Amino acid sequence: MSDGGQTIQTYDKVAAAYDAQNSGPVWRVHEHVTLQGVAPLLPPPGGAVLDAGAGSGTYALAFLGRGDRVTLLDPSPGMLDVARAKVAQRGLSGKARFLQGVVERLSLREGSFDLVFCEGDALSYAGPQRAAAAREILRVLRPGGAFYVSVDNRWIATLGFLAQGRVAEGFAAAAHGKGLDPYGMGVHAFAPDELRDLFVEAGAQDVRVGGKVLFAHFLPPAALEHMGRDPVAWGELLALESRLSADLSLSGHAGHLVVTGRKGGAP
């Protein structure tokens, strides 16, 4: 797994350009499916949300916009600075708190949040501390609170290595989940059963695993851009991606895996 200091330095360097680099049709699909997927787990407006791995604040802005109180957690000060500026520009700073840290060691009180949202592979970066990260996610949730966690997919990591002729790395990804992020840093890529078991063993209830994105990742860029110019076709693609993201039988083909569930106990 990648060194924590290296991860911080890398994301600090790319922070200013991060949003521009992670834009385009595939990311539009990814964001749509993510927001659709987390919607059933959201507390009533005004709830307490932990955005663990908040990055540049894309999803935190959505939570803040509906009136939630949001703690934005990220290991990179540079990414937090970008998020802080975006939140301030929207006039939403009063409901936002910014905290540097990692999901496997949360300096937050037990039972503080109605929802823990962990997008952007923060759990994959936890590497050998992933079991501790799952326990921390549940610890800071209130009884009955929900979590939404996205991670790297072991089978897509394997496919990526093999397609590049990196055979040894591909087999290592398949056997042990040894993946790389887009910047070449080590991450843990999960298999669906492994991800489910991680949260079941941590004590979570109603644990479900799905995947996103299923089709947009594999479409040629020109084809995807063409669909993006056709409102009907684009709407149908978004609906299809959202509907199938909950289909466990397809999760191994998705760009990322998603696990959701709740902390036991009465709200």
Image (cartoon, grey):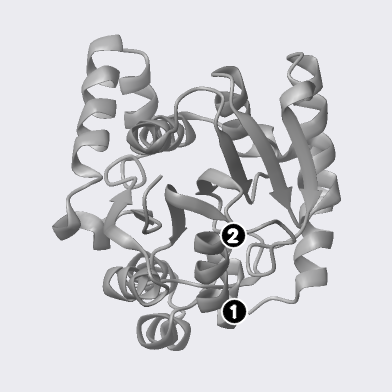
Q: Which residue is mark 1?
A: 129
Please give left or right for residue 40 compared with residue 3 in the image. left
Left/right placement of residue 230 relative to residue 186 reads: left
Give me the disc on residue 234.
none
Callout 2 touching callout 1 (CB < 8 Å): no
Q: Disc 2 or disc 1, which is closer to the eye? A: 1
Q: Amino acid at mark 2?
A: Ala
- The local crowd at label 2, few if under 14, some if 14 to 19, many if 20 or more residues have their Cα within 10 Å, is many
Q: CA distance from mark 2 to mark 1?
A: 11 Å
How dense is the environment of label 1, judged by Cα within 10 Å: few (below 14), some, or many (20 and up)?
A: some
> Which corner quadrant of the image does residue 68 belong to?
top right
Residue at 21% from the left image edge and 22% from the top image edge: 236
Report which quarter residue 42 is drawn in. Answer: top left
- The residue located at (71%, 56%) in the rendering is 108
Q: Nearer the viewer, residue 153 or 109?
A: 109
Where residue 15 sits: x, y (%)?
78, 43
Element under label 2?
helix
Q: Identify the image quadrant of residue 56.
A: top right
Q: Which residue is mark 2?
A: 122
Which secondary structure, mark 1?
helix
Q: Quadrant of the C terminus?
A: top left
